[in-house]
Image: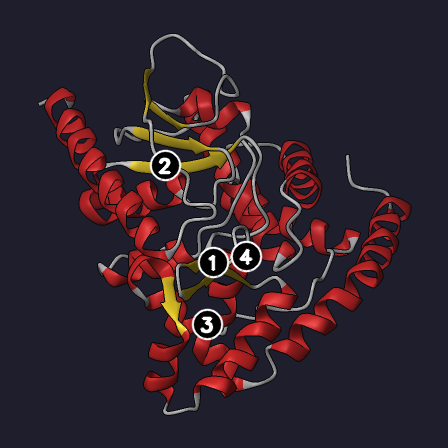
Amino acid sequence: MPIPARDVDGRLAASRVAGGDAAQGIARRLKVLADPTRVRLLGLVVDSPGGRALVGRLATELGLRQPTVSHHMRVMVDEGLLEREKDGRVVWYSIAPGRQAEVAEVLLADGGAEPVPPAPAVLHRIADDLAVRFRGVFSPETIDRYVTESYALLAERARLTRFLPSLTSRFAGDRLQALAAVENRVTDDAPEILFVCVQNAGRSQMASAILRSLAGEQVRVRTAGSQPSEFVNPLVVRALDEIGIPLAGEYPKPLTDEVIRAADYVITMGCGDACPVYPGRRYLDWDLADPVGLPLSGVRAVRDDISLRVRGLLAEIQRRAPD
């Protein structure tokens, strides 16, 4: 059933209130980062061994006086972007826990677009376009329902605000494709692999990107999160880019029943009992560190751990594949 206009308008009004509440904090952060020297300092801290740096080395790198660097670092500590740790007579600076993704997003200069909650007409347009793709597979009513549900899941549970129209279209299309596979409406011999973690912003995204890069068309890969984040951790994007693997426009999305039912392999990563168990599927649980709060060096370690596990998974898939 389409979303009533008043519901969409209500969400829009709510988002404006929330935006107003957050505006002061955003303005303060933008003011702190308006100085390009501070952005360069953040980049040097992120790239430092262990994700921490000394004022002296930073001053040398930028050709600045130490008091100047100390002033900038103090401003960013006061804003909560940096953490200050004294070790004997030296002071180390690192990105504050919980702010790594935000800092990395600034460094990647990926500001994205302004939030645009879809109007009912936009949702209808998405449903009409998907009806062309799934003509003869699903009724327009089913497609409309999945578009409506997908929008609500992304906007409310995943708390996405950027690129909502395009992400709604993609999420609904992925779900309908999975449902078609479950109900045998399409023929595809490629095994379905589902990676599930908590936020669908780090571990599952790295695993899916690495598997796609290694397996190509041999498998169909999906991801989901038990408590999806707003955006993929930019440090994850960076760590993957370092080894030549694109994230290919992936985004956090909630776990839904049809993607589990469509999967031949379900790999969970710290999401507990959030994933229902269905017979006939291969379930694996990978005990992996959570990239949230880790410096770039820690994210790299998680990436390399996942890469080894994915290679083992692909070898198993290829062994079990019918001749």
The residue pinned by badge 1 equals: 85
Q: Residues within 10 Å of mark 3 (few under 14, many from 20)?
A: many
> Which tag, 1 or 3, sits closer to the chain's start?
3
Give me the C-alpha separation between circle 4 and circle 1. Answer: 16 Å
Total number of numbered discs in the rendering: 4
The amino acid sitting under disc 3 is: Leu
Which kind of residue does numbered mark 2 sit on? Ala
Which element type, helix, strand or loop, lies under badge 3? helix
- Give me the disc on residue 289: 2
Residue at screen point 19% across, 45% down: 214
| SS state under label 2 | loop
Label 4 vs label 1, nearer the camera: 1
Binning the other alpha carbons within 10 Å of mark 1 as few (below 14), some (14 to 19) or many (20 upward) gives few
In primary-sequence order, the first of circles 4 and 1 is: 1
Task: Tell us which disc is closer to us: 2 or 3.
Answer: 3
Colour setting: secondary structure
Mark on residue 42? 3
Q: Quadrant of residue 115?
A: bottom right
Tell me what residue is drawn at x 26 percent, y 36 percent.
219
Contact flag, marks 1 and 3 (Cβ < 8 Å):
no
Three-letter amino acid code at the position of disc 4:
Arg
User: In percent of the image, x 72 and y 72: which residue is there?
Assistant: 28
Position of residue 158 measured from the top left corner of the image (x, y, whole percent):
62, 42
Q: Nearer the viewer, residue 143 or 24?
A: 24
Tag shown at residue 99: 4
